[in-house]
Amino acid sequence: MLHFLIAHTNQTAPSHRITSSTPWFWQVLVITMCIWLGLVSEGLATHTVSPTSLTFYAVQGGSNPSRQTLTFTKATTVTATLTASDNATWLAVSPTSQSVTTRATISVAVNISGLTAGTYRASIIVREGTWYAKTIPVTLMISPPSGTTSSATLGWNAVTGTINGYRVYVGEAPRLYTRTITVGTVTSTTVGSLTRGRTYYFAVAAYNSAGVSPLSNEVIKTIP
């Protein structure tokens, strides 16, 4: 009977030690990972690229706009590789790769040769090491050489019910309207004084003595 108790104790003791130590191993591992991820996040939070977007203005057939500069900064003093790339043939960044400790600059140039009037969009990606990447949107707005204006004709379906007329809304950004044109109960109109090469956004609403209806769907047109 005594031997049975000793054998039983020897069999259960290793299992008890394994069971009790296993949670501690995972706890230490999780804590270590959290600390490491926290340090990485804290380090990346100090990385900045300014400005956060770039806009260039030019006239069709004219000279290229002046270069602009992106500035990369970070608080850590570890030397790393900084790269920059773009996704448009009219856009160029320099240098595309360089060493950085705490601060570096990237020159951004635009070439409008062969481009017609209009709005062009692209992006630059700045990367530092493995963990950090920042996308910088770039907009190029080219005006027509003469600065002349043109017009656009709009048409819409009549609404049911009693109305006093329609209002046409015009802007150069989605749902951001800078002009309101009141027309009668007609279902079409021509909007003038639109600069060639620019993109415009249009919407229509009906109105009566009770108020104004919700806006229609938005129509986009670049003026040729």
Image (spheres, helix red, strand yellow):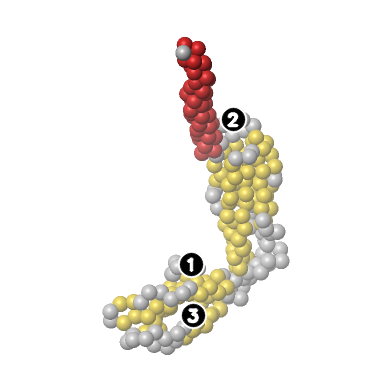
- Looking at the image, is 174 positioned above or below residue 72? below
Residue 133 in percent (x, y) is at 60, 45
Residue 174 is labelled as 1
Q: Residue furthest top?
A: 2
Labels 2 and 1 touching (C-beta < 8 A) = no
Q: Residue 148 location, x and y as percent?
A: 58, 75
Q: Is residue 166 left or right of residue 93?
A: left
Tell me what residue is drawn at x 58 percent, y 55 percent. Answer: 137
Q: Nearer the viewer, mark 1 or mark 3?
A: 1
Nearer the camera: disc 2 or disc 3: 2
Q: Amino acid at mark 2?
A: Thr
Labels 2 and 1: the sequence-earlier one: 2
Q: Residue 143 — which label?
A: none
**Residue 190, horizontal then vertical, whole percent:** 49, 83
Residue in the picture at 49% in, 15% down: 4
Look at the numbered discs 1 and 3 and tell me whether their residues touch, using CB distance below 8 Å: no
* Residue 17 visible in the snapshot: no
What amino acid type is highlighted by mark number 1? Pro
Spot the residue most to the front: 1
Q: Earlier in the sequence, mark 2 or mark 3?
A: 2
Decide: few, some or many residues near mark 1? Use Cα within 10 Å; few <14, some 14-19, many ≥20.
some
Q: Position of residue 123 (x, y in %)?
A: 61, 55
Q: How would you rate the neighbour count of disc 2 (Cα within 10 Å): few for under 14, some for 14-19, many for 20 or more?
A: few
Q: Quadrant of residue 43?
A: top right
Q: CA distance from mark 2 to mark 3?
A: 57 Å
Q: Which label is found at residue 191?
A: 3
Q: 203 above or below 30?
A: below
Disc 1 element: loop
Disc 2 versus disc 1: distance between alpha carbons? 43 Å
Asked whether, in this view, residue 20 is left or right of residue 105, the answer is left
Disc 2 designates what residue? 77
